[in-house]
Amino acid sequence: MLGRSHRSKPGKAKLKEAIDRTRAVLRVPAEYRIGIVAGSDTGAVELALWSLLGPKPVDVLAWESFGEDWVTDVVKQLKLKESRVIKAGYGALPDLTQAKSAHDIVFLWNGTTSGVRVPDGNWIRNDREGLTICDATSAAFAMDLPWAKLDVATFSWQKALGSEGGHGMIVLSPKAAARFESYNPPWPMPKTSRLTKDGKLIEGIFEGETINTPSMLAVEDYLDALKWAEKIGGLPELMARADRNLAALAHWVKKTEWVDFLAADEKTRSNIGVPEDRRSVVHGARQRGAGESRDQHRQPFGKRRGCARHRRLSRGTAGLAHLVRIDGGNGRHRESHALARLGLRAGKGKLNRCPRFSFPTICPLRRLRSSRSAASRPT
Ligand SMILES: Cc1ncc(COP(=O)(O)O)c(C=O)c1O
């Protein structure tokens, strides 16, 4: 398909296949629409915020940097007067019960940069009046997303599934679709964010027509990742792998004195997010400095810096370990295996020589891609 137009018959069929396989793997209900949009997950989230917000008060939940981005969008960019920001610091979740069902609610399923996720969707009412707009980019394919609780969910291909970046997925409930068609925002909308024409959703978008040109190479790669996901057992196995990897890391954290999870409450601990940066956060676990108490070390923005190699590794990476790939197919918790896949070294190796940060962070994407066929072999 490379070199063929995405508007050609076979090109469109590939895009439709990506939508259909996404629906099958993620078990998205038939009445929900799925579209491929520009600008990766950010493009999908912002399309939803710009298109849908305004008619109702908005509650934005934030507990790490990406949630803060959506706060900026709602409060500073869209300047929605009737908005409330419900926040918590790194390692915690805000009080979810503060979010009102009469309001639109904007939140992340998994806070990638703190390794803290919502434990479930029970705090969202089934009879809510407002819409729930959920950035699920690092949750989709690794966590159970209760579709009945989500009106808009977004994600991108390069996150949990470890595919190529560039494209965003947007999943719309019938209620979200109705808002698209009944509400016309008072601000201008750029073309890449327009899902409607003459007050109606452009249905072709949910059948594989894209607003602008996608990368057919990335589409092939996403299809390959989806087929891989189906082959290994679909969503249950993807989630189980992520859980097994969390268990392996938790086991290691438990017996390692100088490291701890950032997520204070076990129920909110991400099974996929491996926050990384100079805070030295590994799977939401941060290296504890000498003399620091467990509480002290939860301050995420320490001033300490790692060695040059660590800094290099910290830059420009996707911020996720794609843990669903890390654990081998045999179901055993092989800690050294899991750590190796994370790009970590237990006890020896170059990276451990960094005086500050023994554990860099994540598997580069390419390494995961090339290791897909040899998923059970430590590198
Ligand atoms: C929770 C969350 N939201 C949004 C983004 C941005 O995603 P993208 O680069 O696909 O736009 C990320 C990236 O890691 C993320 O983790």
Image (cartoon, helix red, strand yellow):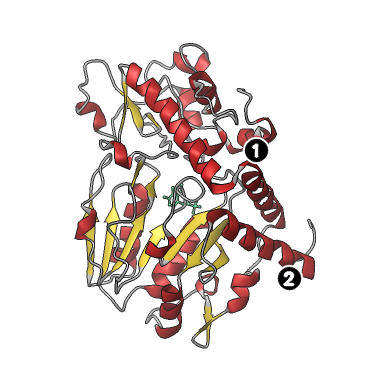
| Alpha carbon separation for disc pair 2 and 1 | 27 Å
Image spot of residue 257 (x, y percent): 30, 16
Quadrant (top left, top right, bottom left, bottom right) of the C terminus: top right
What residue is shown at x 57% (from left), y 36% (from top)? 325
Q: Label 1 amino acid?
A: Arg
What residue is shown at x 33% (from left), y 28% (from top)? 286
Secondary structure type for disc 2: loop
Can you tell which quarter of the image residue 186 is in? Answer: bottom left
Mark 2 or mark 1: which comes first in sequence? 2
In this picture, residue 301 sits left or right of residue 3: left
Q: Is mark 1 within 8 Å of ligand 1?
A: no
Image spot of residue 224 (x, y percent): 69, 48
Verify CB contact (< 8 Å) between mark 2 and mark 1: no
Image spot of residue 275 (x, y percent): 40, 37
267 or 201: nearer the viewer: 267
Q: Is residue 128 above or below residue 341?
A: below
Quadrant (top left, top right, bottom left, bottom right) of the N terminus: bottom right
- Is disc 1 surrounded by few (<14), some (14 to 19) or many (20+) residues within 10 Å? some
Q: Is residue 327 above or below residue 167?
A: above
Residue at the spot of label 2 = 7
Outermost residue on the bottom side: it is 198
Name the mark on residue 369.
Answer: 1
